[in-house]
Image (cartoon, rainbow, N blue to C red):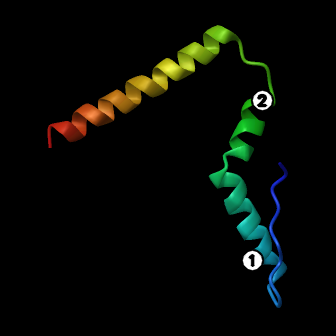
């Protein structure tokens, strides 16, 4: 389903573009497109996910001790 916004009556184009960008960011479309721009080896995918998981675990432990 394509992402679309309706321009409100009397709305500036800059504001409409800003709303479109926020909607794309919320739906993580830009992130997916950038991730699929280049091929990533399966071992690199696993390594990246493992690194993110380690970081979130570290943050979780840090805030549990507070």
State the CA–CA distance, disc 1 to disc 2: 28 Å
When asked about the image quadrant of residue 37, the answer is top right
Label 2, residues with CA under 10 Å away: few <14, some 14-19, many ≥20: few
Q: Above or below — where is 17 with respect to 38? A: below
Q: Above or below — where is 36 with respect to 15? A: above
When asked about the image quadrant of residue 53, the answer is top left
Q: Position of residue 52 (x, y in %)?
A: 47, 27
Residue 36 is marked as: 2
Q: Position of residue 56 (x, y in %)?
A: 38, 32
Residue 15 is marked as: 1
Residue drawn at 62 percent across, 17 percent down: 45
Residue at the far left in the pictured view: 66
Q: Position of residue 38 (x, y in %)?
A: 80, 25
Residue at the far bottom in the pictured view: 10
CB under 8 Å between discs 1 and 2: no
SS under mark 1: helix
Residue at the far front in the pictured view: 1
Residue drawn at 14 percent across, 43 percent down: 66
Label 1, residues with CA under 10 Å away: few <14, some 14-19, many ≥20: few
Q: How many marks?
A: 2
Q: Earlier in the sequence, mark 1 or mark 2?
A: 1
Q: Above or below — where is 19 with respect to 47? A: below
SS under mark 2: loop
């Amino acid at each position: 389903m394509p992402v679309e916004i309706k321009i409100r009556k009397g709305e500036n184009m800059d504001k409409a573009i800003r709303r479109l960008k926020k909607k794309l960011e919320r739906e993580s479309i830009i992130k997916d497109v950038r991730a699929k721009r280049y091929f990533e080896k399966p071992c690199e995918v696993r390594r990246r996910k493992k690194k993110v998981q380690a970081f979130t675990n570290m943050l979780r432990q840090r805030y549990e001790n507070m």
